[in-house]
Amino acid sequence: MAEPAFELYAFWRSSATFRVRVALNFKGLTAREILIDLDAGEQLSADFLAINPQGAIPALIEPGYPPLTQSVAILEFLDERFPSPPLFPSDPHGRARVRSLAALMASDTHPLIVPRVKKYLTASGGFDDAAWRAWQVNWFTRGFQAMEARLSKESATGVFCHGDTPTLADICLASVTAVARVFKVEVPDIPTVNRISARCAEIPAFAKADPMAQVGAPS
Ligand SMILES: N[C@@H](CCC(=O)N[C@@H](CS)C(=O)NCC(=O)O)C(=O)O
């Protein structure tokens, strides 16, 4: 199948964009990136709101189709459209476990530290820089410790979150560890999370997606 001319609305440090970058790389696909500067508020420009009324990246556009938004939905789309290599194990229980681990990171941890939450808490919630920092550290810690508790105890954990090949769960885990590094948040006592994240970083599809390797990242 000829590769579509994908366009990806992206920002260097965006955790959700990282997930799509890894999946594209993993599948041997490419996308032309269009920068949405989150620090400049470009996610709220009229032009971008016409693409994603939620005002959040990523958005993936395949010519001739409406924009795709929500990183996990985009990853599932890419996996259905380009099945090899797969992002899920083949058995239903394994697939449910992978989705559950992915949701712990992408649905229940990452959304608490995005710019719109910071903006609300600092503009309307009385948060100063120290309170925001404590908030960030708290939610990264709670998310990674829950992940550690599961990964260290559940027998399906292997070299990666589920067995010995990377899945969507690893992409979601690595997306949150990558952004924790950007924000210089270190969570103690998470050896399994750290082991798997370090193993992911050795894989070119993950390494190429690292925030610090993107256009716009601080040098
Ligand atoms: N659940 C969404 C989250 C999207 C999201 O919040 N993206 C962040 C960047 S990682 C964003 O664009 N935030 C803009 C803002 O909070 O104003 C996904 O996985 O795509």
Image (cartoon, rainbow, N blue to C red):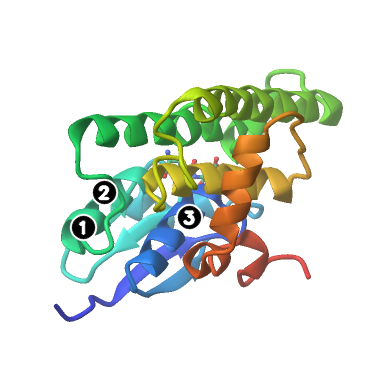
Locate residue 115 relative to residue 2 in the image: left or right.
right
Give the foreground label among 2 and 1.
Answer: 2
Locate residue 87 relative to residue 163 in the image: left or right.
left
Q: Which mark is drawn over residue 76?
A: 2
Query: Residue 197: horizontal and vertical position, in percent?
Result: 59, 48
Q: Is residue 47 visible?
A: no
Q: Which is nearer the N-term, disc 2 or disc 1?
A: 1
C-alpha separation, residue under disc 1 versus residue under disc 3: 18 Å
The answer to whether mark 2 is within 8 Å of ligand 1 is no
Q: Looking at the picture, does residue 10 appear above or below residue 63?
A: above
Q: Counting other residues with Cα less than 10 Å from the Cα at mark 2, is it few (<14), some (14-19), or many (20 or more)?
A: some
Q: What's the amino acid at mark 3?
A: Thr
- Where residue 5 sits, quadrant-wise, is bottom left
The answer to whether mark 1 is within 8 Å of ligand 1 is no
Q: Looking at the picture, does residue 214 appear above or below residue 94?
A: below
Q: Quickly name the residue at label 1.
A: 66
Give the foreground label among 3 and 2.
Answer: 2
Q: Are marks 1 and 3 in contact (CB under 8 Å)?
A: no
Q: Hey, which residue is sitting farthest top in the picture?
A: 125
- Where residue 215 sits, quadrant-wise, is bottom right
Q: Which mark is drawn over residue 56?
A: none
Query: Residue 151: horizontal and vertical position, in percent?
Result: 51, 30
- Residue at the image point whose x is 29% and y is 45% from the top: 73
Q: What's the amino acid at mark 2?
A: Glu
Query: Residue 179: horizontal and vertical position, in percent?
Result: 64, 47
Q: What's the amino acid at mark 1?
A: Pro
The answer to whether mark 3 is within 8 Å of ligand 1 is yes
Nearer to us in this view, 132 or 27 = 27
Nearer to us in this view, 198 or 34 = 198
Q: Quickly name the residue at label 3.
A: 17
- Residue at the image point whose x is 63% and y is 22% from the top: 142
